[in-house]
Amino acid sequence: MLYASLAVTHLSDTAALLVDQNATRVQLVLQAESNFNSAAVSEKNVILSAADEKAAKAAIEAYNAATAATLDAIGHFETIAADPEQHALIETFRGAVVNRREASAHVFELATAGKVDEAFAYSRGVAAKHRQVAMAAVGKLITMNVDKMQAARDASVAMATQTRTLLMIGATAGAGAMFQAMSSLGFNAQDAYGLLKLDAYSDVSGVKFLLNIDVASIAEVDQMTPKAVSLGAQLIKSPYKTYYNWYQAVLLDPEQNVFRINHMME
């Protein structure tokens, strides 16, 4: 019970950390791409609404907001990206976004001056080249981080398989002789709490039980008790001989469940 609790907790925490870190990177880079695409749409809307000063102004404001959101998302991504290759792609993307913003500003000048054809031409030519550079960089970032998230998932599966194997070994071979032999559940009368030095846990309603880890000898009880403590158990009562001729130690696991390491003497 103790070993399983520690192993499963470690698996859960590690797997969650691996997946969460990579999922956050993917989310941020997708946000950057989405905001950048929104800016491109707003640029076209400025040209199309150039004759309506109010509409054109609103489209320019939308463009600026989308571009700022793009740079903000890639900035947050940069703080959690450790890979030098990703940092290089981030710089390429950021540079292209800034260059596109400068090109778009010229597009807006042409459009609001009534030079719609020239605005379209500049957007399709100069501005579009910067957009292509940005989209190539962000596409690579997305692929890299989706691959990393898949790798994290595979690592979690491998970790789960390893943990399951160790637990099976613990159940059958005794986790290095720790749980060698049978285990059983014990249901206690009220008087047993004082005997087991568990008085503090006796005033509780509901079904009461504890796990007995039955081992082959007195020596194994003495060996396994400190081993359990080293793994996180709390020793309640050191190994002793009971009046009913058992040799046992009483412990709590990290979740405050009672268990005994026990040898039934002849």
Image (cartoon, grey):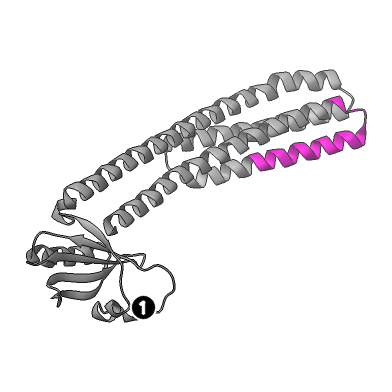
Residue at x 57% of width, y 33% of height: 93
For the record, the magenta segment spans 48-70
Residue 13 rendering spot, x and y as whole percentages: 40, 52
Helix or strand or loop: what does disc 1 sit on?
loop
- Residue placed under numbered mark 1 in the picture: 202
Secondary structure mostly taken by the magenta-highlighted segment of the chain: helix
Quick check: 112 above or below 185?
above
Q: Quadrant of residue 165?
A: top left
| Few, some or many residues within 10 Å of mark 1 (<14, 14–19, 20+) | some
Q: Quadrant of residue 101?
A: top right
Left or right, 101 with reference to 51: left
Left or right, 131 with reference to 182: right
Left or right, 139 with reference to 121: left
Taking the magenta stretch, the answer to whether it contains residue 29 is no
Quick check: 129 above or below 245?
above
Left or right, 120 with reference to 92: right
**In front: 228, or 133?**
228
Residue 128 rendering spot, x and y as whole percentages: 68, 22
Q: Quadrant of residue 247?
A: bottom left
Q: Amino acid at mark 1?
A: Ser
**In front: 179, or 208?**
208
Residue at x 40% of width, y 79% of height: 203
Residue at x 21% of width, y 50% of height: 170
Residue 243 rendering spot, x and y as whole percentages: 14, 78
Residue at x 36% of width, y 54% of height: 9
